[in-house]
Amino acid sequence: MIIEDELESIFEKYIPATPYRKPTPETLLADLGVDSLGFIELIADIESVFNLNITNEDIDKLKTVGDVIKLVSGMAG
Amino acid sequence: MSERILITGIGFILPVGIGKEAAWQALINGCSGIAPITRFDTSAHNCRVAGEVKGWESNPLSKDPSRFDRVIQFALGAANLAIEDAGLTSADLGNPRTGVSMGTGLGGIWFAESQLKSLYENGTKKVSPITVPNVNPNAISTQIAMEWQCSGINMTVCTACASGAHAIGQAMDAMRLGRADIMIVGGAEAPLTPLSFTGFDNMRVMACHNGEPDKACRPFDKGRNGFVLGEGAGVLILETESRARRRGARAYAELCGYGASCGGYHLVAPQPDGRDAAISMERALSDAQLNKEEIGYINAHGTSTKANDLVETMAVKKVFVEKSYQVPLSSTKSMTGHLIGAAGAVEAAITALALYHGMLPPTINYETPDPECDLDYVPTLARQVHIKAALSNSFAFGNNNACLAFRKAP
C-alpha cells in the first residue's frame, strides 16, 4: 500500500486541481488531464522518489494508472 | 491612416499592491513597497532591501507552485487581472486576431538557479524535465496564450529594463500594420533570487540605505546611491479603437507613439550626455505626432542611481530645452522599486492612469535637491493636473532605450 499511496500523492501533483478526479488503477493515463511534459515530470518524480531508472521502452508500455503501479511495484519491490 | 490604439485594461501585481485600484491608490498616496528582504538571507550583502510582492500566493498554474517560476505566475496573474479589468472573455480572446507581447529581463532565473544547485548537489536525475520551458523567457507570453487560447502574434522581448516598453511598442506597431485587434502586453520579472540579487549587489548598483527601507530608493535626490530591486508584473490590454467602441469599452488612454534607440556605448552605464535617450523621446514624440508643448507629464526611468538620474535629466533637457522646467516628471520606482523587464510596462500603465485620473503620482524621498537634477520631479505629493499627453521612459542596461507616448483617451 505504501507504494500506491506514494504514487497517488505524485499523481495528485500533476492532475489538474479543478475539477480534481481521483485516479483509479483503471484510469487511462491519457485521461488524467496531464500534458506530455507534465507526464515526463511525473515519471521523473517517480524515478526520484523510488530511486528507479524508467526507460523510454517502459514508458511506451504504460497505458493506465494500474500499469504504473505494476511497473513501480515490480521494480521497487 | 491606421487605427488609434486604446488601453482598455490594466492588471498589476506589484510590491505596492495587487490589482489596478490598490496599486494606484498606493502610488498616489506615496506609499513605498520597499522593505527588508524576507525571501533569502542577505546578511552578507551591501543591499538588504527590495520590493517583494506580498499577499499574493495565488498560483493559477499548478497545485505545486515550485513547478512554475514566479515570473510566469506573475505574468499570468497580471494578465488575468487586466483581462478582467477590460471586461473581456475567452470568447473575445480565443482567436488569431489576439496576440501577446511581453517583456522580461531575466526570465525564469530562479528556476535556472534551483536546478543548477540540484544538478551539482544531487546529480542529473534531480534536474526537472521542465527546466528549459521554465527558464525560456518566452514562457511568460506562451502561458498567457495557452490560458486564453490567443492564437495571434506571440513574443517575449528581452531588453533588460526596457523589455516591457519595447514589448508594448512592438505590439503597437503590429496593430498599426493591421496584424492584431487586441494585444495583451506587459512585462514580468522575478529577480529576487540569491544569484540575480547577488549579481546586482556585487555590481554595486543597488541602494545601501538599509536602515530606512522605505527611503532607500530616492530618485533624483542628492543622497541617492542606487536602485532597489522590485518584483511583479504589469499587463495592459491594447485594443483598436473600432473594436473598443463596438463593445463600449472604457479607455484609460490612447497609446500613440513609440521611440526606440540604442547608445551602443556600454553594457550597463548610460551614455554620459544622454543623447541616445533623447533620441528615443524625440522618436516617440514624432511617431505620435505630438509637439513637446503638448506633453504634460513624463514617467521617468528614474532608477535612483547617480548616473541614470543625471543622464535622464540631461536627456529631457535636450528634448524639451527651455520647456524642460515646465514638464513634471516623476519616478514611481521610488515606491515600486525597479522591476527590470516589467518596469516599462508597469510605468506605461501608470502613465495611462495618470492621464485617465488627471493625477500625477509623486517621486517619494526627494528631499535634498541635487543641483545637477533640477527639474520638477513632483516631489512627495501627488498632483492633480489637466494634461493631454504624456511620455514614459525606459532606459536599460546595454543602452537599450524605449519611450512610449500617450494621449488622453478620445
Image (cartoon, coloured by chain):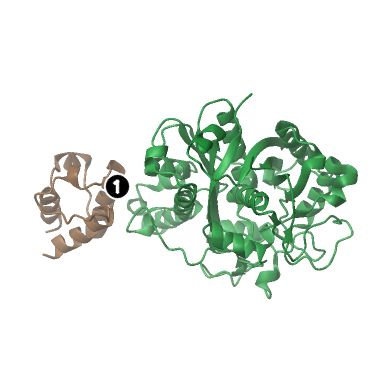
Q: Write the residue at 75% across / 63% down.
A: B225
Would you say B375 lies left or right of A14 here? right
Would you say B400 lies left or right of A76 here? right
Residue A48 percent location from the top left of the image: 27, 56
Above or below for B384 versus B317? below
Residue B105 visible, this angle: yes
Where residue B219 sits, quadrant-wise, is: bottom right
Q: Residues within 10 Å of mark 1 (few under 14, many from 20)?
A: some
Residue B180 percent location from the top left of the image: 50, 30
Q: Write the residue at 53% across / 60% down.
A: B193
Which part of the image, by quadrant, shows the N terminus of chain A? bottom left
Residue B119 percent location from the top left of the image: 40, 54
Residue B270 visible, this angle: no
Pick the front one: B86 or B98: B86
Would you say B144 lies left or right of B287 here? left
Q: Helix or strand or loop: what does disc 1 sit on?
A: helix
Q: Write the residue at 79% across / 53% down.
A: B328
Colour brown maps to chain = A
Q: Which residue is mark 1?
A: A38
> Mark 1 falls within which chain?
A
Chain B rendering hue: green
